[in-house]
Image (cartoon, rainbow, N blue to C red):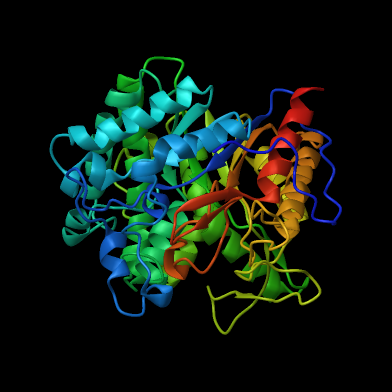
Amino acid sequence: MSIDPQPADSGLPLPTLNIPGLPADFVWGVATSAYQIEGAVDADGRTPSIWDTFSRTPGAIANGDHGNTACDHYHRMPDDVRLIADLGLDAYRFSLSWPRVQPGGRGPANGKGLDFYDRLVDELLARGITPWATLYHWDLPQALEDAGGWPERDTAHRFADYAELAAGRLGDRVQHWITLNEPFCSAILGYHVGCHAPGRQDFRAAIRAVHHLHLGHGLAVRRIRSVVPTPAQVGITFNPAQVYPASTEPADLDATRHADGMGARIYLDPVLRGEYPQDVVEDLARLGASLPVEAGDLDTIAQPLDFLGINYYFSDVVAAGDGPGRPVTVPRPDRPVTAMPWEIHPQGMTDLLTRISRDYPGIPLYITENGAAFDDSVHAADADGSIQDIDRTAYLADHLTAVGRAREAGADVRGFFAWSLMDNFEWAYGYDKRFGIVHVDYETQRRTPKQSALWLRDAAGATRSR
């Protein structure tokens, strides 16, 4: 599919293409994840992941949806890469399916599974697009969950084995590696809240999972560096909470400290400082949980990194709840929301990026996800069916402007990956929520670039031409 060089006229004003603060060499990309787009869940030796299992749990996913077909990217990959190229973007962040690469999470690599990622990488490079590979975007092989999952220490070692297999095959061409995507979601939403796979509700297990995810990250960094030629770039992606106190009352300030500790510092500190925050350790003890740290773990976790990925969608105002360790979010009805419904607050991104640069200096930052779900509809007046998603276009423009402000304040932010390339399986929301800059008709699998895609293309071009 080729893309019309001019955006369709929606009759509504488009945001400016001139984003202050972004340099000509700023990286412009899009992101996806394997389970959300690939489909082909039983093709070529792939075994079930925890999301395959969770999707079969009655009531777990909206409308009983699942990723069996998703966007059928496994069979349509060349056309999807062509879409990225037609948008003139620099980079594509994708994830590898662990159970496709290493069925069951143990043993040798699955050649047919890795062949798919071989073809993907070659297709990207042939079109001048830099591949950014994420090793883990939540699709733990079900066999490893059956053995205890991330709460068990052995899973960290299995992840390191898988990382070495993947990097050993692709590392001659892939120079940007992300170990984990949002370990907060894997641990807390998967093992404590239970709204993500594997759907468990055990706080102590979730805290053990936090540490073993960190350990798996550190072990994987070592393995990647052992098999990928320099100058490989290795990092991790977090979604650190950006929280503000509801008032200056001591109870609200302490609730904010706790929320920041559990949503941000418990991830940032061990990876970037080699220690867990003492106040978080004390909070966990009061809640009857502990991090299962063994001798040498923190040195392993704190491997030198080349960059830090940051995913940002919204911020929170928090107040004291009904007990210690139970902060509550205070709604702000005066602010607009997305279809999730998440509050739209670009200033939170500026504050987060400048805070991380101040508290953890010296590491380059990339926005590895930012985007919004809105209730898109195909504009009947447009012969090509173009989607006039002015809300998403404005959201991306406002958040890229927030990145520019952070850079002007000293944050070393080097790139931005829009979430997502295309509408896809949105986890527990199924196919109800659309984040894509490209519309997907799930009945026909037809892809249609939205106004946001065309604006992103033109904004990238305007920035490069400075």
In the picture, measured across the screen, residue 381 lies left or right of residue 61, that is right
Q: Position of residue 26 (x, y in %)?
A: 68, 28
The residue depicted at 32 percent of the width and 28 percent of the height is 118
Query: Which residue is outermost to the bottom?
Result: 322
Q: Does any portion of residue 274 appear in the rendered image?
A: no
In the picture, measured across the screen, residue 34 lies left or right of residue 426, that is left
In the picture, measured across the screen, residue 12 lies left or right of residue 246, that is right
Q: Position of residue 460 (x, y in %)?
A: 71, 32
In the picture, measured across the screen, residue 96 lies left or right of residue 161, that is right
The residue depicted at 77 percent of the width and 77 percent of the height is 333
Q: Is residue 413 above or below residue 375?
A: above
Q: Which of the 4 image quarters holds residue 220?
A: top left
Q: Position of residue 208 (x, y in %)?
A: 33, 58
Q: In this rendered view, identify the residue nearer to me: 65 or 326.
A: 65
Q: Is residue 75 above or below residue 323?
A: above
Q: Is residue 214 above or below residue 336?
A: above
Total marks shown come to 0
Q: In this rendered view, identify the residue nearer to me: 317 or 345.
A: 345
Query: Which residue is outermost to the top?
Result: 230
Q: Position of residue 385 (x, y in %)?
A: 64, 55
The residue depicted at 81 percent of the width and 33 percent of the height is 21
The residue depicted at 30 percent of the width and 67 percent of the height is 54
Query: Which residue is outermost to the left?
Result: 107
Q: Which quarter of the rendering shows the N terminus?
A: top right
Q: Which quarter of the rendering shows the C terminus?
A: top right
Q: Does any portion of residue 259 appear in the rendered image?
A: yes
